[in-house]
Amino acid sequence: MIRGFAVDLGGTKTAAARISDGRIVAREQAPTDGNAGFDGQIAAMKALLDRLGYPRGEALGVAVAGRVDQEGRWQAVNAATLPGITGEPLLTKLRAVFGDRVILRNDAAAATLAEARLGAGRGARHFAYLTVSTGVGGGVMLDGSLLQSPNGLAGHVGFMSSPFGDERCGSGRRGTVESVASGRAIARAAGTPDARAAFASDQPEAQEAIDRSAAAVARLCGDLTALFGLDRIAIGGSVGLGEGYLARVLAKFEEEPPLFRVPVIPAILGHDSALLGALLPDSEMSLS
């Protein structure tokens, strides 16, 4: 079973945890300062780990929003989320601060690993995880292996095109899934401070924004099934697990031809997925 410490740095919050026997036994978190630079983000991680009693050299998994390439450089693909991160040597810096037993990966990729091995994807050969939150991300597992690319872009499914979108998202692309389905897009279309307020609103604009988001995610599920021959999809994230959201996705998904309809279920691990997945090795062997 996995054990050690983990950090999940997202666009809204940064969480740290101590993990024992595959379970989170202690946790700390704080709001992410999106405007902090590279050193500021590492200092924020260290502050949370210090509160958990992290000893230098212990196993540490780090999951971050954005793109992580095979050299461990960190780039904020969505410039609006972490504008101070521009291709920084994150893995090198983390190992200098915390020791050599550091694993680094994208947060959605980490969540995909955890759901595939410990959660909603267990038993599926070709599995995708989608997170619908501030942004839209995800990952794909094919025959037990996480789909990865040297530039770290593989799995950023929110940047795929959607017939429901026409705005430009933070990646610079226009008409993407994220531009219409993300929490930020819902709030903008609904005229509310955030997606949570849109879900609580009975105004037509808010309900229409949520419906468009669900339709875009349903179409994405069909597209990913066509591309990878998926046999199961799990949806997580603060929007994805919002009350009634999955039901809206499933209603739209019923409009797809049967060939493209696979089971779409809620993620099981919730907000723990990226923390657990950050510490999982790429192989099935437990981290020692």
Image (cartoon, rainbow, N blue to C red):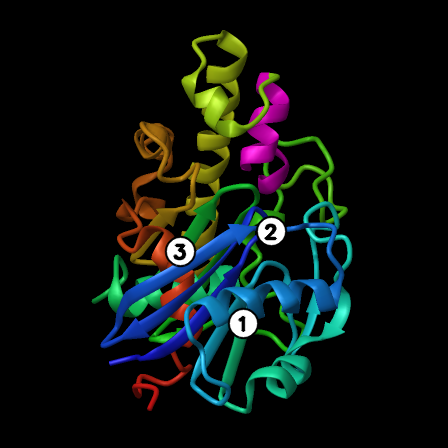
Q: How crowded is mark 1: few (under 14 residues within 10 Å), some or many (20 or more)?
A: many
The answer to whether residue 172 shows anywhere in this view is: yes
Residues at marks 3 and 1, CA–CA distance in whole angstroms: 15 Å
On the image, numbered disc 2 is attached to which residue?
32
* First in sequence: mark 3 vs mark 1: 1
Q: Which of marks 3 and 1 is in front?
A: 1
Quarter containing the N terminus:
bottom left
Residues at marks 1 and 2, CA–CA distance in whole angstroms: 18 Å
Q: What stretch is highlighted in magenta?
A: 177-190
Is residue 1 left or right of 47 when viewed as pictured? left
Q: Nearer the viewer, mark 2 or mark 3?
A: 2
Q: Does the magenta stretch include residue 259?
A: no
On the image, numbered disc 1 is attached to which residue?
105
Q: What residue type is labelled 3?
A: Tyr
Q: Which amino acid does label 1 sit on?
A: Arg
Query: What secondary structure is marked by label 1?
Result: strand
Is residue 91 left or right of 224 when viewed as pictured? right
Relative to 271, is 206 above or below? Answer: above
* First in sequence: mark 2 vs mark 3: 2
Q: Nearer the viewer, residue 72 or 9?
A: 9
Residue 32 in the image, given as x and y percentages of width and height: 60, 51
Q: Residue at x 69, y 69 (%)?
A: 74
Query: What secondary structure is marked by label 3?
Result: strand
Q: Which of 284 and 200 is in front in this view?
A: 200
Residue 67 in the image, given as x and y percentages of width and height: 64, 65
On the image, numbered disc 3 is attached to which residue?
129
Query: What secondary structure is marked by label 2?
Result: loop
Is residue 27 left or right of 41 when viewed as pictured? left
The answer to whether residue 126 shows anywhere in this view is: no
Q: What residue type is labelled 2?
A: Thr
